[in-house]
Image: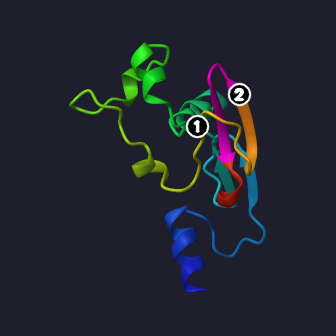
Amino acid sequence: MAEFTQLSSLLNLDPSVDPYRVFQGVSSGSRNEIALTTRPIMSAMFYLGQSIDIPDDVRRSGVVNTGLADDEQGEPFDWSVVFEDLFRVHHARERPADAYASVQYDDYWYYIDNKRM
């Protein structure tokens, strides 16, 4: 109960209300509703795209724009620091035997490892 009291205080909710109205949008300021605003789909796709393991030769070719993803030294930023094990797309020259999902593009197979699902 202490956690609920703390959460309702943080969200400026009336702790005596049951249930709360949960919806997507902007809050009217009412203490009996929880308004959620989700990230736009293109923004989510951008961040998921940062979890694709790009082969070095493809990166050097300039086909992939990593402009926003470079660190101070101009090296590709290691997004695994942000995503940890949440999501990762690997690459391989040969079709992976145990992939959750895979797709061939040019000379590589890109896949989600079935062991991580």
Quadrant (top left, top right, bottom left, bottom right) of the C terminus: bottom right
Residue 24 screen position, x and y as percent: 72, 44
Question: Which residues are the magenta region?
Answer: 104-112
Vertical position of residue 58 compared to residue 4: above or below: above
Vertical position of residue 104 compared to residue 7: above or below: above
Instruction: Tell me the kind of residue under disc 2.
Output: Gln
Specify the quadrant of the image occupied by residue 56.
top left
* Tag of residue 104: 2
Residue 93 screen position, x and y as percent: 61, 33
Count numbered badges in the picture. 2
Quadrant (top left, top right, bottom left, bottom right) of the N terminus: bottom right
Q: Residue furthest front?
A: 94
Which residue was labeled with disc 1? 91
Residue 90 screen position, x and y as percent: 58, 41
* Camera-nearest residue between 47 and 100: 100
Residue 94 screen position, x and y as percent: 66, 36
Specify the quadrant of the image occupied by residue 46.
top right
Vertical position of residue 61 compared to residue 12: above or below: above
